[in-house]
Amino acid sequence: MIRKIAIVLLLAVVGYVAWVVALNLPGNKTPSSSPPAPKMAAGPAKTIEIVRSGPLVIPVTGVAASQLADTFDDARGEGRVHDAIDIMAPRGTPVIAAATGTVEKLFDSKLGGKTIYIRRDGGQWVDYYAHLDTYSPGLAEGQKVPQGHMIGTVGSTGDASPEAPHLHYAINAMAPGERWYQGKAINPYPLLTQK
Ligand SMILES: [Zn+2]
């Protein structure tokens, strides 16, 4: 009798242990015990960019770093300085995003022609692409674009010469709260040519 009770108790203990082990096995967890999966931010304003330390890509396809010229400090009349790099290429050459970011503004201006402002790296940088011939179909403000994504084509809209189509590419360092047309230009040339 005592032996039977002992066996029943033993079976109960073994069964309990097996049940506990089974509950704790990976993959056997009930949904309610799992933490909720992190959700991607829905709106562009909430998007958190991963800070990249790697080099930018040259934002015009088929252009090698050795073909670039440092035109950052060139005078542009009326006391203005260029504050950008001009990347020469035939009209219609694809323009691609130098870095992953979010399209903040598509703007048609007298000087820049068709332009794109892409904010990146948590908002601290805005890349500026100007004199575009066309925007990529469907490109829209608020759209997230990965590095290398085609955003438009090289042209000469704005104050660029029709005989010398090029991409005017600028990088602006943004203070907190600054808007797409603000910021302080840094020279893209060393960033585009670093190995
Ligand atoms: Zn320029």
Image (cartoon, rainbow, N blue to C red):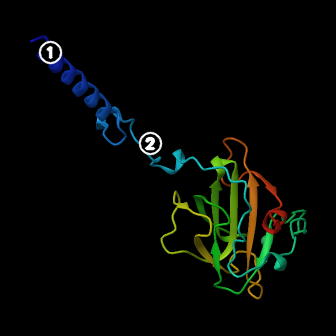
Would you say the beta carbon of the disc 2 residue lies within 8 angstroms of ligand 1? no
Please, is residue 155 above or below residue 2 in the view? below
Q: Residue at x 35, y 37 (%)?
A: 25
Residue 169 placed where, x, y %? 74, 68
Quarter occupied by the N terminus: top left
Q: Is residue 7 left or right of residue 48?
A: left
At 37% across and 40% down in the image, what residue appears? Answer: 26
Say what amino acid the circle numbered 1 marks: Arg
Q: Position of residue 172 (x, y in %)?
A: 75, 55
Residue 114's spot in the image, x, y percent?
64, 71
Name the side, left or right, on which 26 lies relative to 191: left
The residue pinned by badge 2 equals 38
The part of the image, by quadrant, that contains residue 60 is bottom right
Measure the alpha-carbon separation of dots 2 and 1: 54 Å
Q: Which residue is mark 1?
A: 3
Q: Ligand 1 is found in which quarter of the picture?
A: bottom right
Which numbered dot is residue 192? none
- Give left or right: position of 139 versus 122: left
Quadrant (top left, top right, bottom left, bottom right) of the C terminus: bottom right
On the question of residue 179 being in view, the answer is no
**Label 2: which secondary element:** loop
Q: 142 and 131: which one is in front?
A: 142
Q: Observer-nearest residue: 60 or 155?
A: 60
The amino acid sitting under disc 2 is Pro
Disc 2 packing (10 Å; few <14; some 14–19; many ≥20) = few
> Of all residues shown, which one is farthest toward the top?
2
* Image coordinates for residue 105, horizontal then vertical, percent: 59, 59
Query: Callout 1: few (<14), some (14-19), or many (20+) C-alpha neighbours within 10 Å?
Result: few
